Image: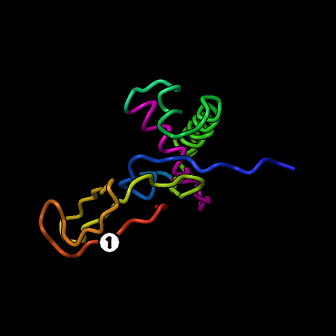
Amino acid sequence: MARPRHANSVQIPPRIKGFTPVGYCNGECEPLLLYLEELEVIRLLDYEGLSQEEAARLMQRSRSSVTRIYQRARATIAKALVEGVEVKIESGNGFLNCNWFFCSGCKVRFNNPKGNVTNECVLCGSTEIVKMEGCV
């Protein structure tokens, strides 16, 4: 029997829900799934330039787990680029580790690490605030 999968801590929610290839597409293909924890590893290692050890600490996982997640993410991205397949971002085993909010007025995302309920946007003052859940 396989071990249960652990949830991975995600620092920042994604700004997008996926990518679509531009140009030639070979028929209708099923989109590839890039999970929230895979996107987080790509962000931490490739975008932020952290070591796998530092990323593992932030995600509350072992370095070897981060390495496996990173390999899956790179394989998914490579396949999407080479084959021209759409990528969709889904929650998988990732969770947001802070209270994140989205302003419908100015489209900004902001967090509230203290967990206090907020009634207005920190940027524009709008009251059209939606609490983001732990998935995309």
In the rendered image, residue 7 lying in the magenta stretch gets the answer no
Image: 105 above or below 23: below
Q: Few, some or many C-alpha atoms within 10 Å of disc 1 (few <14, some 14-19, many ≥20)?
A: some
**In the displayed structure image, the side of residue 26 where residue 117 appears, left or right:** left
The magenta stretch spans residue 43: yes
Quarter assignment of residue 114: bottom left
Count of labels in the image: 1
Across and down, in percent, residue 136 comes to 46, 61
Residue at x-position 39% and y-position 54%: 98
Mark 1: secondary structure? strand
Residue lying at 23% horizontally and 64% vertically, measured from the top left? 107
Q: Given the current orientation, which residue lies at the most extreme bottom position? A: 128
List the residue tagged with mark 1: 130
Q: Magenta region: which residues?
A: 25-47
Tell me the kind of residue under disc 1.
Val
| Residue located 59% across and 34% down the image | 66
Q: Residue at x 19, y 66 (%)?
A: 121
Q: Nearer the viewer, residue 55 or 115?
A: 115
Comparing 75 with 21, the one in front is: 75
Q: Is residue 90 left or right of residue 109?
A: right
The way the protein has been coloured in the rendering is: rainbow
Q: Image height check: is 39 above or below 98? A: above
Query: Where residue 110 appears, x then y in whole percent?
Result: 27, 57
Q: Which residue is more in the foreground, 77 or 132? A: 132
In the image, residue 103 above or below residue 73:
below
Outermost right residue: 1
Residue 116, image x, y percentages: 30, 64
As drawn, 51 above or below 57: above
Image coordinates of residue 39 in percent, x first then y, are 49, 45
Residue 111, picture quadrant: bottom left
